[in-house]
Image: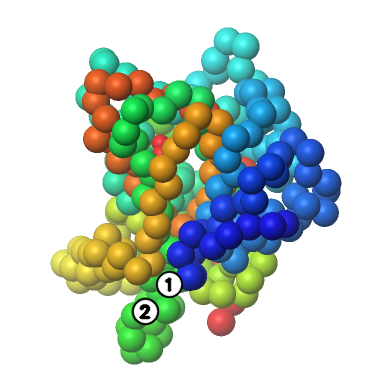
Amino acid sequence: MKYSDITPTFGAELAAGTQLTELSDDNVIALKQLAAERGIVVARDQNMDVHDQAAFGHRLGPIMDAPQKIPDVPDGLILIQAGPKSRAVAGQKWHSDVSSEPIPPGISMLRMEVVPPSGGDTLFADMYGAFEQLSPALQNFLKQLNARHDPKGHYLYLSGAKRLGELPSTSHPVVRTHPLTGRNALYVNSGFVGRINELSSLESERLLALLYDHIAYSVNIQCRVKWEPNTVVFWDNRVVQHHAAFDYYPEVRRGYRVTVVGEAPYLAN
Ligand code: SIN
């Protein structure tokens, strides 16, 4: 696969002319490996509709169920939409998609159809880099810990439950190993994590605040994607967090996301 780096350590943009719908099975394996190594992969100018996107998602792995069923849109696609009536958008804080699942997502694939004249970028942060930039002493401490991830509102649609409190939380290691690279990444996010299990409530709160500040302020582990119509971005939720900028109100931004099931997070070493 031909691509250019977005930063020296993070993100890849596929060469102009690459059409995802024409990739061979070997190329799809290479794309998953590239997402594992570089965190995010950007593909511009894709000739793709919702049906092609669903078909491509299935080539990446089993697709997670989606909260909405949209007429004429294949199951599993989530509509990402904002316009003049929007007061907030999905993903407006640093997070890893639905990490409260016992088997959380691997790759997410977002394809944008309508973009605002300016703004509406998605920011990404590299959790390999976030972990590796910590001191060895803190790295070793974090490797002993697990965090509780709590479901958020959209799960109510999927589960049929009436209240969030009826839905189970899940614990995952604070540091996880990517199965394709063997590298360790920080795996706590402000979107879903309630607390660190092994610490007191105060210790957990302060340690999470330190880690979230580290993620938010470490600009050298981040990149930012400017969307164009027909841009597709893949991110590997095992090792990446993202943050949707909502700076374009009242303009319209619309696209679809497919989320591919990963595996239960583990720490190998
Ligand atoms: C999301 O959190 O998946 C939405 C990202 C975006 O809209 O840029």
Query: According to the image, what is the colour scheme of the structure?
Result: rainbow
Q: Is residue 87 left or right of residue 55?
A: left
**127 lies above or below 22:** below
Where does the image place residue 246, in percent across and percent down from the top left? 27, 35
Residue at 40% over, 57% down: 223
Q: Is residue 169 visible?
A: no
Q: Which mark is residue 133?
A: 2
User: Dot 1 lies on which element?
Assistant: helix
Residue extending farthest top: 71
Ligand 1, seen in the image, is in the quarter at top left
Q: Is residue 196 left or right of residue 40?
A: left
Residue at 53% over, 54% down: 40
Label tally: 2
Q: Decide if ligand 1 comes within 8 Å of the CB at mark 2.
A: no
**CA gap, disc 2 to disc 1?**
6 Å
Instruction: Return the residue at label 1.
Output: 129
Residue at 26% over, 16% down: 84
**Residue 260 quadrant:** top right
Where does the image place residue 215, in percent across and percent down from the top left? 31, 64
Q: Are marks 2 and 1 in contact (CB under 8 Å)?
A: yes
Where does the image place residue 97, in percent across and percent down from the top left? 46, 46
Q: Amino acid at mark 1?
A: Gly
Residue extending farthest front: 16
Where does the image place residue 147, in percent across and percent down from the top left? 38, 62
